Image: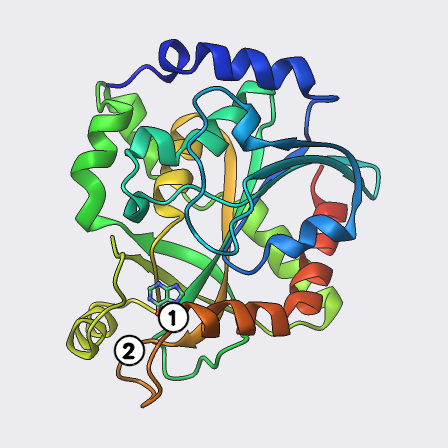
Amino acid sequence: MINLNNKYHDLVAALKDQAPFTPDVALILGSGLGEFAGSVDTLKTISTVSLPGYPPSTVQGHEGKIHFAHYAGKNLMLFQGRIHFYEGYKLSQCVLPVFLAHKTNCRKVILTNAAGGINPVFVPGDLMLNASFNAYNIKKELSHLIGIISRESKDRILSFPSPGLNDKIRRAAMSEGICLREGVYWYVKGPSYETPSEIKMIGRFGGDAVGMSTVHEALYASYLGMEVAAITCITNYAAGISPVKLSHAEVTETANRVKHTFESLIKKIITLVD
Ligand code: HPA
């Protein structure tokens, strides 16, 4: 078990020093979805490079900023940019946003991400609520990170997603007239995209969308006892489903195309969370 309190003592102190409030909800903004941060009233922006020990972002479209903002009377903590395992970081680093949100006494987290669509009904630009996820290929590392030490902690890990939060997300989509898909997010380590045959296998095993993030944040948040949910932007057809070669540019382009729908969904969710 890795004790993040010891490891990140100075980082937590620096963040707490600057945090203007206790957030009602934290959001981690996935690839191409970071612009949401510009649509709310920002009180304070912290550049993550100024925080001691915070890993620098190496991925295009992941800014490395933490915003404290207001929307609809709610206090928000927005992570514009995330830390990926495929960047070569340790899982204990990848879960830092969730750990830091928890340290500011935030108890709800909404994770967002970009992913390739496998479910034949999905098209690029669809938003998908994560009904469940598959993280089998990183379970060993995750277990090591949180230390499966008791029956109680095992039970808590299984509580993703939080049913109450998912209900609110469904309600938000309905009231905004957004067709919200639902499905299983299948985690892959990356960093290269999948082969068509890998996608065929994942589809047969029940994966609806495939991506390289989120599951460690979700499990860690759940381990900390936070309410957690995740929303995926289907940015492309997964490998082999369309003849077009996959690229990070397609991912960010699609995310940019649906940014207004994404923004109205997230804003409605914020009004509904207590
Ligand atoms: N595969 C893995 N990760 C992704 C994809 C994909 O097709 N699209 C966006 N992130």
Q: Amino acid at mark 2?
A: Ala
Q: Is mark 2 within 8 Å of ligand 1?
A: yes
**SS of the residue under disc 2:** loop
User: Quick check: can you spot residue 101?
Assistant: no
**SS of the residue under disc 1:** strand
CB contact under 8 Å: marks 1 and 2? yes
Of the two numbered discs 1 and 2 on the same chain, state the one appearing first in sequence: 1
Give residue 146's quadrant in the image: top left
Q: Which residue is mark 2?
A: 239
Residue occupying image coordinates x 32% and y 28%: 92
Q: Amino acid at mark 1?
A: Gly
Which color scheme does this rendered protein use?
rainbow
User: For this rendering, which residue is in front, 231 or 159?
Assistant: 231
- Position of 188 relative to 196 (above/below): above
Give residue 20's quadrant in the image: top right
- Position of 72 relative to 115 (above/below): above
Give x and y (percent) for residue 107: 58, 28
Q: Which mark is residue 55?
A: none
Residue occupying image coordinates x 53% and y 23%: 51
Q: Quadrant of the image for the C terminus?
A: top right
Q: Whole-Å distance between the Cαs marked 1 and 2?
A: 8 Å
Q: Is residue 203 left or right of residue 167?
A: left
Give x and y (percent) for residue 228: 50, 41
User: Quick check: can you spot residue 41?
Assistant: yes
Q: Which mark is residue 116?
A: 1
Q: Is mark 1 within 8 Å of ligand 1?
A: yes
